[in-house]
């Protein structure tokens, strides 16, 4: 629920207080955005409540003062080259920090190093093999807030890359294969086709045709290459990349992801691998290192991942990176990212309450508001404020233990060895604090992670079915992490000397990285004998264990070392062969140990940890779970916004970028003017309560979709209209109610008057199909419009839709279904029509009208519309498609898109946009439901179409109740049609989709929406 005003109308405080609970990346991003301007700092007073002594959560790291100040991470963290929001935030943070010349890390570019070398493990009958890929690097850097290419643009780019790759592949291998020139011809043809294709045309029939072409090419290549794939590792890898990319493309096109918006969420129900299989991927590809790498990087091996998010993540990772695919931090994440954010926020006046463990959020009696936050205080800073950072080699860092000398209870804490950040810590709180709404906070940003919510948000979960569904369906998993300091340089350890990040290796430590670049930052001297640093991490379990269960290894060092020993002895030599002796056994002396222990005892000197604390568990993106997440601005309780990689941002993957995006969205919900790059249009959250079942009544005709129309003969007439009037119409009925969330503009200065005569109209739903059918006549004005999206400084057409402002039908059934289900403004009229062959000779529409609007005006039945055809003057033999194609050209200079779209008007499918609304019974100037809907009408059978000869004269009454001239910018009284087309077909009106729904609360305008308003 967005919070746009103070909840205290009578006693508006000078500054509104925000309590941010938890200090992970999402919370810190929210705090950064909420203090980004002087006006915001004046408006808000912010306090971050964090248990223990560390910020950073899953991204925290410390310096161990007892171990040479070495870095100890929560887990291996690399940033990806498309993390535009996270990099931008951090760049700005460093700029504001203004560290002096000579400081260890002064800028974003000092903080990261580029990394392009990746190795994926492949388990073959011969054992583990390593597949190395070097992703090219450029001079660019992310972090200037530049927009990401849209998924459709990325996909077009990727398609071109794949086809070029296939060409190379073919050229490379054709020597050994039968020389079949048509393959090269086919490839060249496809390449040409895609080069001329507008990205946004990847919808409907064009998409399916492209998918079929790619499929037949893939099948052909597979049959040629099949026999060599088993034996030749290089060919197999090339093939896997090709098949993976081609199948992803086929799936996206076939599933019509770009049909109405970039709807990756529609693919969420299927696991990524199953989705690849569904679209024809072979087991070789599905079980390849390439696909497994995604599962391992997202800690979801065995648990699965929704296909839509996996695809979106892969598309961004491979096609949208800038500079390098990966970025490694030059020091620990704690000092590279979290400490600079802390320092800047502190300067901006944000207060940090360390040692504050949130116990529970409590609701008001009516369960609508957050009334109290109950917190256990774990320690007392002697001077009133705890200063958490220490200096290591000139860098402000987080220490491995609290700075006891700053705490009243310091000595006792040190003696107790209390694990203050542990959920299971038995250290008694020194005070219970209760924060009260109105006194201590006006807004709460909940940044504690999902795993802990059953404990801290149990009242919210009990009060809200949506919260119940979220904690039930969005799962988390334990992780394990290991850091090894080694005495052998990496070049001698690795078979591949390019210091790679290796993944898809043996679980549960499936991801490894050489981190030897950290040696200088840890300050090792040559005489210490440390020559390299290796990090590994992975998942433990598959997200099914209850979050309240402790992992015994988390607190039992001996058990953890036993586990690490087993793994290292069995698996390390495969991946780091230089660490093994001539018989392939691990050389324990290769591990650095300042105390000179021998054998596995050297593990005492390494860093091992299991992340099993509820809030520390990694958040999964299981198939079918995305719809159960709750968005930062839709928490459903007054005074509460959410921040974390577990919320619904549209980019719902557990990573630093998602956490940053979520924090920014939380800040936006509180009024901060943030700009978010790569925001994915998100579907509406599941309704707060389960939708009740519709109570069917006999004879009631609001039947279930799809709504089928068979034996349809349609005549479509093009009428010139004024663009300005059409713009005003779209603003009035679509753009203004959508409050900036969507933007429709006229596609051409034309409207189409279409008269459709259907032999049979019925529900295609199996249960309602048996009720019967009705003949139906529909006469309507169709306004072509582009749904726009923000591009670089301007709006770009995204998809063609039709808006029908006036619709007349012959039956009550048609009116009921149209109005109640979709939002067609239908009225029932008498239609008289005369036709000869395909041609409409005469049409008359008579219905109830109000000629003028005065209190004395009595409604009458009168002619609303009339069409007459004359053969005397032959008229231009032009089709609707031609005329519209031409008219749209100014917006689409290549013409390819527009003419193809126009073809689809008559030949394939159309998307219709609606304003669906119901008047409230009590507040009668209000709508109790109002939404912008889009629904598709798809042609099932096309029997024929073509231009109609003759001259068509259209006349209208222009009654006050039917102001066609003013509404549509037509001539008063009537005008001649510019072109006419007939079509004979069957079609189905599919179920629709809410593009935007106005809730009782004013919805916050998305950045996309704001961009739409600004650019437009
Ligand atoms: C092992 C591992 C490796 C990863 N590697 C990568 C990677 O390479 N790249 C990448 O992009 N992402 C990676 N991630 C994911 C990334 O770390 C997270 O997506 C991100 O840190 C989540 O941030 P957050 O703010 O949403 O949550 P968190 O980081 O979990 O923040 C929650 C905050 O709430 C605090 N908190 C919890 N309970 C309480 C309480 N009761 N009272 C007060 N405070 C509380 C926590 O201490 C923490 O500060 C990795 C995650 C793990 C676990």
Image (cartoon, rainbow, N blue to C red):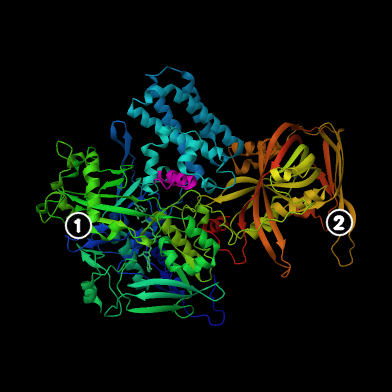
Q: Please state if 177 lies on the left or on the right of 716 as rendered.
A: left
Indicate if the residue with disc 2 has its beta carbon within 8 Å of ligand 1: no
Residue 836 appears in the rendering: yes
Q: Please state if 253 lies on the left or on the right of 988 as rendered.
A: left
Q: Please, which residue is most extreme toward the bottom here?
A: 11
Residue 718 appears in the rendering: no
Separation of marks 2 and 1 at Cα, in angstroms: 84 Å
Secondary structure found at label 2: strand
Front residue of this view, candidates 35 and 335: 335
Task: Give the percent coordinates (x, y) of residue 734.
Answer: 66, 56
Crowd band around label 1 with a 10 angstrom C-alpha radius: few (<14), some (14–19), many (20+): some
Of the numbered discs in the image, which one, if any, rests on residue 323?
Answer: none
Within the image, what quadrant is residue 553 found in? bottom left
Indicate if the residue with disc 1 has its beta carbon within 8 Å of ligand 1: no
Q: Please state if 429 lies on the left or on the right of 870 as rendered.
A: left
Q: Earlier in the sequence, mark 2 or mark 1?
A: 1
* Residue indicated by mark 2: 849
Q: Quadrant of the N terminus?
A: bottom right
- Image quadrant, ligand 1: bottom left
Q: Residue at x 27, y 61 (%)?
A: 555
Task: Give the percent coordinates (x, y) of residue 529.
Answer: 12, 51
Whether residue 307 is in magenta: the answer is yes
* Residue indicated by mark 1: 522
Highlighted range, magenta:
301-317
């Amino acid at each position: 629920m967005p919070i746009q005003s103070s909840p205290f109308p009578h006693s508006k405080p000078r500054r509104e207080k925000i309590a941010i609970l938890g200090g992970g990346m999402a919370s810190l991003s929210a705090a950064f955005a909420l203090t980004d301007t002087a006006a915001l700092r004046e408006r808000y007073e912010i306090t971050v409540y964090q248990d223990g002594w560390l910020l950073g959560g899953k991204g925290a790291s410390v310096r161990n003062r007892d171990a040479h100040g070495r870095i100890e991470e929560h887990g291996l963290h690399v940033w990806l080259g498309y993390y535009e929001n996270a990099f931008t935030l951090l760049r700005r943070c460093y700029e504001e920090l203004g560290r002096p010349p000579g400081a260890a890390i002064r800028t974003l570019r000092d903080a990261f190093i580029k990394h392009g070398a990746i190795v994926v493990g492949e388990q073959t009958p011969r054992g583990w093999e390593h597949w190395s890929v070097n992703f090219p690097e450029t001079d660019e850097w992310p972090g200037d807030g530049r927009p990401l290419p849209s998924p459709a643009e990325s996909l077009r780019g990727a398609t071109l890359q794949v086809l070029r790759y296939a060409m190379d592949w073919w050229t490379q291998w054709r020597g050994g294969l039968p020389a079949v020139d048509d393959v090269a011809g086919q490839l060249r043809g496809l390449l040409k086709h895609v080069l001329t294709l507008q990205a946004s045309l990847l919808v409907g029939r064009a998409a399916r045709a492209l998918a079929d072409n790619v499929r037949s090419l893939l099948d052909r290549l597979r049959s040629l290459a099949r026999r060599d794939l088993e034996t030749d590792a290089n060919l197999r890898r090339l093939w896997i990349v090709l098949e993976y990319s081609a199948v992803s493309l086929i799936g996206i096109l076939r599933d019509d992801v770009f049909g109405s918006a970039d709807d990756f969420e529609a693919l969420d129900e299927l696991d990524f691998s199953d989705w690849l299989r569904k679209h024809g991927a072979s087991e070789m590809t599905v079980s390849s290192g390439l696909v497994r790498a995604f599962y391992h990087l997202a800690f979801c091996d065995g648990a699965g991942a929704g296909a839509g998010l996996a695809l979106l993540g892969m598309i961004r990772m491979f096609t949208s990176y800038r500079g390098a695919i990966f970025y490694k931090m030059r020091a620990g994440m704690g000092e590279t990212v979290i400490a600079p954010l802390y320092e800047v926020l502190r300067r901006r006046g944000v207060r940090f309450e360390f040692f504050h463990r949130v116990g529970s959020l409590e609701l008001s009696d009516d369960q609508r508001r957050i009334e109290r936050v109950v917190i256990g205080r774990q320690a007392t800073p002697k001077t009133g404020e705890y200063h958490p950072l220490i200096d290591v080699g000139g860098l402000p860092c987080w220490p491995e233990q609290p700075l006891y000398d700053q705490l009243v209870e310091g000595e006792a804490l040190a003696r107790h060895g209390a694990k203050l950040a542990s959920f299971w810590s038995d250290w008694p709180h020194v005070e219970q604090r209760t924060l009260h709404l109105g006194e201590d906070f006006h807004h709460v940003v909940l940044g504690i992670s999902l795993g802990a919510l059953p404990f801290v948000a149990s009242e919210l979960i009990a009060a809200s079915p949506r919260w119940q569904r979220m904690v039930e369906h969005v799962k988390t998993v334990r992780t394990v992490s290991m850091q090894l300091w080694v005495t052998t340089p990496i070049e001698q350890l690795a078979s591949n000397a390019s210091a790679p990040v290796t993944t898809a290796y043996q679980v549960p430590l499936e991801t490894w990285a050489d981190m030897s670049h950290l040696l200088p930052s840890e300050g090792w001297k040559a005489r210490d004998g440390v020559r390299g640093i290796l990090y590994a991490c992975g998942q433990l379990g598959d997200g099914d264990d209850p979050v309240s269960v402790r992992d015994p290894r988390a607190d039992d060092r001996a058990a953890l070392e036993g586990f690490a020993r087993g793994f290292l002895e069995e698996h390390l030599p495969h991946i780091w062969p230089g660490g093994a002796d001539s018989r392939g056994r691990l050389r324990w002396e290769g591990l650095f140990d300042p105390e000179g222990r021998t054998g596995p005892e050297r593990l005492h000197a390494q860093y091992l940890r299991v992340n099993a604390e509820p809030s520390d568990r990694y958040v999964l993106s299981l198939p079918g779970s995305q719809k159960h997440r709750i968005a930062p601005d839709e928490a459903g309780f007054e005074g509460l916004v959410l921040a974390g990689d577990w919320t619904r941002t549209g980019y719902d993957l557990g990573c630093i970028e998602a956490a940053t995006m979520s924090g920014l969205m939380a800040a936006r919900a509180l009024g901060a003017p943030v700009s978010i790059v790569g925001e994915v249009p998100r579907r509406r959250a599941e309704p707060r309560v389960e939708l009740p079942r519709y109570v069917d009544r006999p004879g009631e005709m609001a039947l279930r979709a799809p709504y089928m129309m068979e034996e349809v003969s349609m005549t479509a007439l093009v009428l010139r209209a004024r663009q300005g009037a059409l713009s005003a119409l779209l603003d009035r009925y679509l753009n203004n109610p959508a409050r900036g969330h969507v933007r429709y503009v006229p596609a051409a200065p034309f409207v189409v008057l279409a008269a459709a005569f259907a032999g049979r109209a019925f529900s295609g739903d199996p249960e309602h199909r048996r009720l019967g059918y009705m003949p139906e006549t529909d006469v309507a004005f169709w306004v072509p419009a582009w749904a726009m999206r923000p591009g670089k400084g301007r709006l770009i057409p995204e998809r063609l839709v039709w808006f029908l402002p006036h619709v007349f039908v012959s039956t009550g059934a048609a009116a009921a279904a149209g109005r109640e289900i979709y939002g067609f403004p239908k009225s029932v009229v008498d239609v008289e029509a005369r036709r000869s062959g395909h041609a409409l000779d005469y049409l008359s529409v008579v219905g109830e009208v109000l000629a003028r609007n005065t209190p004395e005006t009595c409604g009458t039945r009168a002619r609303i519309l009339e069409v007459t055809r004359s053969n005397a003057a032959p008229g231009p033999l032009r089709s609707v498609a031609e005329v519209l194609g031409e008219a749209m050209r100014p917006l689409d200079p290549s013409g390819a898109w527009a003419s193809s779209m126009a073809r689809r008007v008559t030949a394939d499918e159309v998307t219709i946009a609606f304003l669906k609304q119901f008047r409230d019974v009590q507040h009668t100037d209000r709508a109790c439901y109002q939404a912008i809907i889009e629904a598709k009408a798809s042609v099932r059978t096309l029997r024929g179409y073509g231009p109609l000869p003759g001259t068509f004269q259209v006349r209208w009454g222009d009654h006050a109740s039917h102001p066609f001239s003013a509404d549509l910018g037509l001539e008063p009284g009537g005008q001649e049609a510019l072109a006419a087309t007939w079509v004979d077909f069957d079609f189905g009106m599919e179920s629709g989709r809410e593009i935007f729904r106005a809730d009782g609360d004013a919805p916050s305008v998305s950045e996309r929406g704001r961009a739409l308003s600004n650019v437009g």
